[in-house]
């Protein structure tokens, strides 16, 4: 039995899917106006772990991730300029060019971190008609009202809103204030262009304009996955406003529960502050990898902590993860695969038990190291590690069948001859040449050992 911490019930609950063997899951993806930072990538790595874990337990997973390429205003609310349009004007490009450029970078980062491609990636601009349809249903049911700048959702018509948002009705909203709104918590479903110069705008029953940020996720999730999702994932910054808005508009359209289990990944901090573009303290993946770091060290770093706890990104923590991955790779690459040896089911059971405890990847890593340090047959260890890596995603399988190229082997033999004869300058030169080819030579009492360099 998998147990998950449901953010809105604040309880650890038994995970019971709607369908016996199929999970419908949605993850809030990036707004593509700048490069995603590693705080964002922590969320998407967690989403990947959830998907991989569910598949590990035998489920079929339909996981959808959105790309926000319109409607996300600068204040995360109903005021200010569209983030994608703002970036486009700054760069002198079209909104679609900016969105494509940063979407492509995001997809590259997913590959670098070995994050599996979702069942479907949806873009907000490709679901405009679906968003208009939902707004029209909400209007027909009496959940909306019109102001000079757009169509708004009336949260007073959905009393559970304040329970989900964990707010009092008279509490000020972080959404940009519009004094004409009936409540500061009411949110825009459709914004009017009102004669402003916009790069992206659409015809609608209410006039030319564009959808609000929140309606896109409801439209795409309901269209692709149906009225009720099993799991919805996002960063904890979405818990107070964006996700309650999704719940309100979705449930008022369908009269069904929108999501059974909400999972929110905590912030990744930098210098003890939340990493965010607005604070200017962001680190992106390439900032780390340009120093020769294996991206799997970053993935390992994320896996080593509970997803619900804030994590502080430090050089020391990254160095520890680099060393752990290097040690793991050295071990895996030193064994030749022998599938006939099978796996150690007792360790797999321990591994699965940790994962079933609200996706406890730190505990799962601990089981992995217990296996490596155990007296289990080495070939059985390798087979068992490869099974674990179906969830961990640390690319262990790419090390299997590792063969030293003849060129490297020949250089190492010549270098060893030079070293024994005391011709150290030539030996050092060949060592550097071997390193350029991606290998290193370690001198031992018996001779030397060739190892692949895993950055």
Image (tube, grey):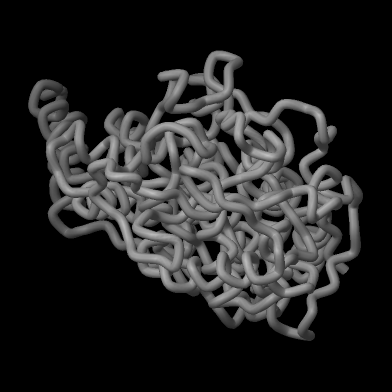
Number of callouts: 0
In front of the other: 425 or 198: 198
**Which of 443/76 is in front?**
76
- Residue drawn at (79%, 85%) of the image: 20
From the viewer's perspective, is 125 left or right of 348?
Answer: left
Regarding residue 304, the answer to whether it shows in the image is no
Q: Residue 330: x, y in percent?
A: 46, 47
In which quadrant of the rendered image does the C terminus lie? top left
- 169 on left or right of 211: right
Q: Position of residue 361 (x, y in %)?
A: 69, 49
Residue that appears at 34% across and 45% down: 194
Is residue 245 something one can see in this rendering?
yes
Horizontal relation, residue 442 to residue 132: left or right = left
Q: Residue at x 41, y 27 (%)?
A: 283
Q: In the rendered view of the protein, which quadrant contains the N terminus?
A: bottom right
Which residue is at a point 45% across and 55% down the rendered structure image? 211
Residue 18 falls in image quadrant: bottom right
Rendering coords of residue 303 (x, y %): 62, 44
Pinpoint residue 434: horizontal percent, then vertical percent.
Answer: 18, 40
Q: Is residue 269 above or below residue 454?
A: above
């Amino acid at each position: 039995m998998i147990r998950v911490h449901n953010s809105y019930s604040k309880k650890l609950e038994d995970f019971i899917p709607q369908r016996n063997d199929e999970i419908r899951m949605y993850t809030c993806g990036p707004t593509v106006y700048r490069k995603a930072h590693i705080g964002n990538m922590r969320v998407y790595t967690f989403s990947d772990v959830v998907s991989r874990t569910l598949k590990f337990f035998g489920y079929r997973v339909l996981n959808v991730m959105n790309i926000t390429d319109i409607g996300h205003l600068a204040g995360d609310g109903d005021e200010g300029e569209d983030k994608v349009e703002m970036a486009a004007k700054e760069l002198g490009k079209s909104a679609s060019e900016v969105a494509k450029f940063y979407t492509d970078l995001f997809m590259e980062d997913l590959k670098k971190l070995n994050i599996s491609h979702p069942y479907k990636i949806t873009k907000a601009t490709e679901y405009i008609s679906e968003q208009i349809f939902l707004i029209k249903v909400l209007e027909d049911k009496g959940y909306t009202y019109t102001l000079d700048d757009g169509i708004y959702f009336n949260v007073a018509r959905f009393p559970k809103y304040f329970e989900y948002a964990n707010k009092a009705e008279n509490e000020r909203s972080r959404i940009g204030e519009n004094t004409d709104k009936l409540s500061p918590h009411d949110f825009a479903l459709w914004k009017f262009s009102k004669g402003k110069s916009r790069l992206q705008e659409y015809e609608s029953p209410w006039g030319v304009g564009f959808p609000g940020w929140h309606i896109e996720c409801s439209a795409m999730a309901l269209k692709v996955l149906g009225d009720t999702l099993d799991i919805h994932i996002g960063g904890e910054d979405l818990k107070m406003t964006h996700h309650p808005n999704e719940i309100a508009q979705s449930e008022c359209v369908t009269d069904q529960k929108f999501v059974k289990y909400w999972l929110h990944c905590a912030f990744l901090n930098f210098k003890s502050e939340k990493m965010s573009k607005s604070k200017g303290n962001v680190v992106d993946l390439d900032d780390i990898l340009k120093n020769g770091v294996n991206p799997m060290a970053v993935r390992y770093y994320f896996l080593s902590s509970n997803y619900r706890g804030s994590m502080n990104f430090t050089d020391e923590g990254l160095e520890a993860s680099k060393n752990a991955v290097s040690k793991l790779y050295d071990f895996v690459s030193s064994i030749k695969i022998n599938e006939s040896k099978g796996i150690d089911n007792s360790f797999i059971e321990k591994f699965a038990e940790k994962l079933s405890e609200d996706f406890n990847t730190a505990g799962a890593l601990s089981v992995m190291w217990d296996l490596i340090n155990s007296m289990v047959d080495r070939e059985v260890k390798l087979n068992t590690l490869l099974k674990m890596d179906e969830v961990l995603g640390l690319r262990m399988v790419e090390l299997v069948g590792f063969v030293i190229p003849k060129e490297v082997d020949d250089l190492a033999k010549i270098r060893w001859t030079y070293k024994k004869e005391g011709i150290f300058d030539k030996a050092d030169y060949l060592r550097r040449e071997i390193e350029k080819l991606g290998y290193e030579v370690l001198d031992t009492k018996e001779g030397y050992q060739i190892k692949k360099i895993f950055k």
